[in-house]
Image (spheres, grey):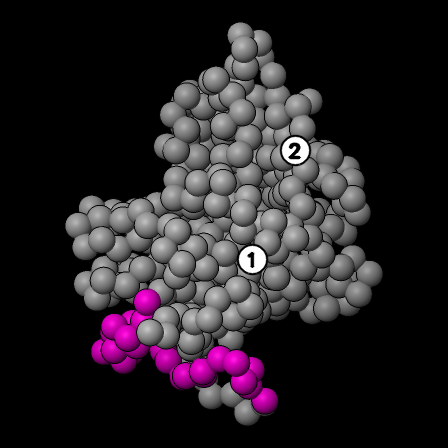
Amino acid sequence: MTQRVLILGGRGRIGNSVARDIAKYTQAEITVTGRKTIEKQQETSFKHLVLDLAETEKLRELISHSDVLVHCAGPFHYRDTKVLQICIEEGVNYLDVSDHRSYTSKVLTLHEQAAQKGVTAVINTGIFPGISNSMVRQCVEQFDQPEKIHLSYVVAGSGGAGVTVMRTTFLGLQNPFEAWIDGNWETVKPYTERETVAFPEPYGQSGVYWFDMPETFTLPKAFPTVKSVVTKFGSVPDFYNHLTWIAANIFPKSWIQNSGGVEFLSQVSHFMTDVTDNFSGIGVAIRSEVTGIKDGLTKSYCSTLAHQNTAVAAGYGTGSIAQLLLEGKLNKPGVYPVEEALPTDLFQETMHERNININQSWL
């Protein structure tokens, strides 16, 4: 029988990348949804439907006729758990590209319900979080006792994800957040404590700052011996970092704590990246460094990745897990962040299939 995949928000750049990846590596029938009818030529390999997530009964009908649901309808800061709840009730496996602590916290509360229904729900599956978390797991598994995780990202310009990545960035500046540091939860202010980190070429030495990501709290849970988890993010060209720092630390808080202010800043930034993308590119780089005990000695292990298109790389992260679910290779009922759900051997297998080169070395 033909397997069916439903992608919510499938017309956005991330959702479209996910759809293309699933189409390339599986034989599934793919339906993508968006809120508006589009006039231009549609991708002929996908079925296109108009859907607003408020249309609960229509949403349930579509999910009930699917084998895998992929939630790409961000930003996730304001999303509730309705989509996952329907998937659990209908017995349909679930993936998302969520990237915010509040949403991650909410869907994790449905773990027992999903487990009882035999539904595998894997969250935070894109590029960061997503592939990045699996890189951390690779590193952690090298140690007898991992103790510190330092996870850094840099994105060039818009990252090929359009205005969505801008909204996500500014929404991430709204509030201080809790980070696991030296065995305690400490309050951290976003876009502070700049570090210069060595990324793969063409990024090289780039500035990164504290940023609120779901992995800030999912990684300590996944790897209980770890005493510190640092998650930092930066942009190239570097002047975007300085502009974001100003937004986080100088602008009146009212500018980034209401939807109008966030939208204004996002649209201005998107206009700017339309220009700078031409010379900065739209790629992404990740550096995962884990320190811990190996054979009685304190050592560090590093894993790095660079890709020329952030949105395409996110498609690889989510599409590869959809492929594993459809092939029956991944079956783990419950709700899990990707680092808890995806074994390293399967991660390596799907990344190799997609020609993703992850460099690993002891430091």
Q: Residue 43 is drawn in which quadrant? A: bottom right
Q: Is residue 285 magenta?
A: no
Q: Amino acid at mark 1?
A: Tyr
Do the CB atoms of the residues marked 1 and 2 lie less than 8 Å apart? no
Compared with residue 83, is residue 114 higher up or lower down, i.e. above or below?
above
Horizontal side of 134 relative to 359 (left or right) equals: left
Q: Is residue 48 magenta-colored?
A: yes
Q: Mark 1 highlights which residue?
A: 316
Q: Is residue 190 above or below residue 46?
A: above
Marked residue nearer the N-terminal end (1 or 2): 1
Check disc 1 and report its element: helix, strand or loop. Answer: helix
Q: What's drawn in magenta, residue-wise?
A: 41-67
Q: Position of residue 210 (x, y in %)?
A: 57, 38
Label 2 Cα neighbours within 10 Å, binned few <14 / some 14-19 / many ≥20 = some
Residue 240 seen by the camera: no
How far separated are the C-alphas under marks 1 and 2?
A: 19 Å
Q: Amino acid at mark 2?
A: Gln
**Image mark count:** 2
* Residue 89 image offset from top left, x and y in percent: 19, 63
The residue that appears at 65% across and 53% down in the rendered structure is 355
Q: Nearer the viewer, residue 199 or 54?
A: 199
Q: Residue at x 40, y 84 (%)?
A: 50
Q: What residue would you read off at disc 2?
A: 360
Residue 1 image position (x, y, % from top left): 33, 74
Asked if residue 129 is positioned above or below residue 14 in the image, the reply reads: above
* Residue farthest along the front direction in this orientation: 1
